[in-house]
Amino acid sequence: MQDKTSETLLPGVERLMSELTTFSNGEASRAASDHLESGGKRVRARLALNASTSLGLSPIKSIAIAAACELIHNASLIHDDIHDKSETRRGKAATWTRFGSGTAICAGDLLISAAYAAIARTHSTSMHQLLTQTHQRVAEVISGQCEDLLAQSNDSLSLDLYETIAKSKSAPLLALPVELALIEAGHQQASEQVGYAADAFALAYQIADDIEDISNDIIQGQPNIISVLGGQDASSSQGEQARQIAVENYRLAARLADQLPRGSGSLLSAYARKGLATILPVGEAA
Amino acid sequence: MQDKTSETLLPGVERLMSELTTFSNGEASRAASDHLESGGKRVRARLALNASTSLGLSPIKSIAIAAACELIHNASLIHDDIHDKSETRRGKAATWTRFGSGTAICAGDLLISAAYAAIARTHSTSMHQLLTQTHQRVAEVISGQCEDLLAQSNDSLSLDLYETIAKSKSAPLLALPVELALIEAGHQQASEQVGYAADAFALAYQIADDIEDISNDIIQGQPNIISVLGGQDASSSQGEQARQIAVENYRLAARLADQLPRGSGSLLSAYARKGLATILPVGEAA
């Protein structure tokens, strides 16, 4: 799904993330490295590399943008696992269970700070905009995480609030990689369109996940789109309604991403079409 | 102690900190505002404003640098209180006790990110260096906090490790305000001298604090310079030895700060001389 040029830049992203988090020794660095080395699909780095190379940015700038987005995402995972008391991540013990929550908080802080040091590596003349947009998206993700924390203790979640939370938890950091590449390439205006594609993708993805997890979520009292709609299982009419919302949003995400300049949204579009294929009934055309 | 010009810029620093942390509504913003409004001496903002105005930087740049340093410092306070389970801060309930530790983690994250958005407001042509230096100092503070967490469970702390921790916990964020002003004013080389002054100041300050707190620290099993030296109270020979180390380091800090270009270290020097006066026996000259 990823083009070859940007695929070859991924090791550079890993090296930069490691460089920016390990120069000061100590427990926080060890915890951060340990988390980064635990894998992950690097979706945000891939989105950034795909957009950057499509737009003709240099490898150094492309890697810097990709590392920044991936560092912020990983910081959010480390901190979210503490909030949510999730004991595993990527099939391994979560950072806070291995290093203690004090060190895990420090490790996440280090990754947030390192993300901005990565942006410095673009040596961009649009640095002010890159930094401002990054902070905007970070603030949105933080706001989403806090609303999610509150929603977990809310038995009567409205569909509106469900959608707001689903979007704000993930869309900002899915939009950011493409936005930074567009800003750096001088397409500031197009960058304002990315958020709509990312919103639609994030919502569809969350719903698809909920449909898979409905039984577990009911047992654990977690918010789930099917319960929000008043249903209990995926085969109910509410399950079908949820699936339809996901289908529409995956389609919208792909269409909007395809409209971005010079193929800069092509990977986001490909992810949306892949998501769509997984939730369409066999035989129905994407 | 603060000159008039830089004193008049402090309200601008408060406004910028508030602007960068409240544009996305939500619990994290509320917790961050609540913490920022709880007061504090704004030592780091004052150091930045003093250095910036001494060096002839514009009010916008001076405020941006001051806000960045103060935001990082406040993030560290919110997160440290969670690590250390400290229930009060500035005479009020600590953020995590009022908003929960999940929201408090989010609030600290928001302040770290906002600090970099503040740096963007300098619109500096040296942005790369400003960002890189900030990340360097943030990484050091994080490393100091982690070492401090480990030291609290270490009964036989060496004097060397005590000094390393005392310096790395506070010196980086005392140095940063002056360093950023010097970098922005084109005195990159002088900025490398600031760290030594801040190290000496931070060590002296921690020792003076320890001398005050020795009885409490012994009861609570907290690391204290007098216990590290093998003593039990401030009037012991170890207490006197501790006082001597503080005196020497305050003097060193003042001397080094006075050597910085165009009075950019004058407030740091004044803080050191003020500290010195509080621990010198009556009648002994500073």
Image (cartoon, coloured by chain):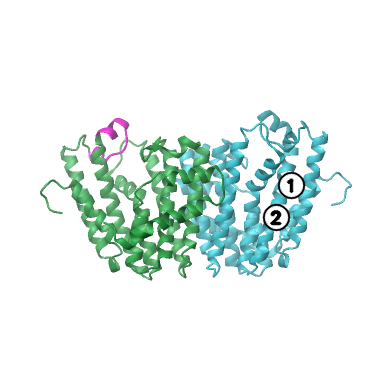
Chain colours: A green, B cyan
Q: Could one spot residue A213 in this view of the protein?
A: yes
Say yes or no: labels 1 and 2 on the same chain: yes
Residue B143 in magenta stretch: no
Q: Taken as a whole, is the magenta stretch helix, strand or loop?
A: helix
* Residue at 38% across, 69% down: A185
The x and y percentages for residue B67 are: 57, 58
Q: CA distance from mark 1 to mark 2?
A: 12 Å
**Residue B160 higher or lower than A183, as above or below:** above
Left or right of A259: which side holds A22? Answer: right
Report which residue position mark 1 lands on. B204
**Membership of A221 in magenta stretch:** yes
* Residue B143 image position (x, y, % from top left): 58, 46
Camera-side residue of B183 and B283: B183
* 10 Å crowding of disc 2: few (<14), some (14-19), many (20+): some
Q: Secondary structure at mark 2?
A: helix
Segment tinted magenta in the rendering: A215-229
Q: Residue B198, position in %: x, y?
A: 69, 53
Count every numbered label the image shows and give the total. 2
Figure check: B86 above or below B283: above
Query: Does the image show residue B37?
Result: no
At x 39%, y 44%, the residue is A147
Disc marking residue B196? 2
Subunit of mark 1?
B
Quadrant location of the C terminus of chain A?
Answer: bottom left
State the image quarter where residue B15 is shown: bottom right
**What SS does tag 1 mark?**
helix
Amino acid type shown at disc 1: Ala
For mark 2, name the chain: B
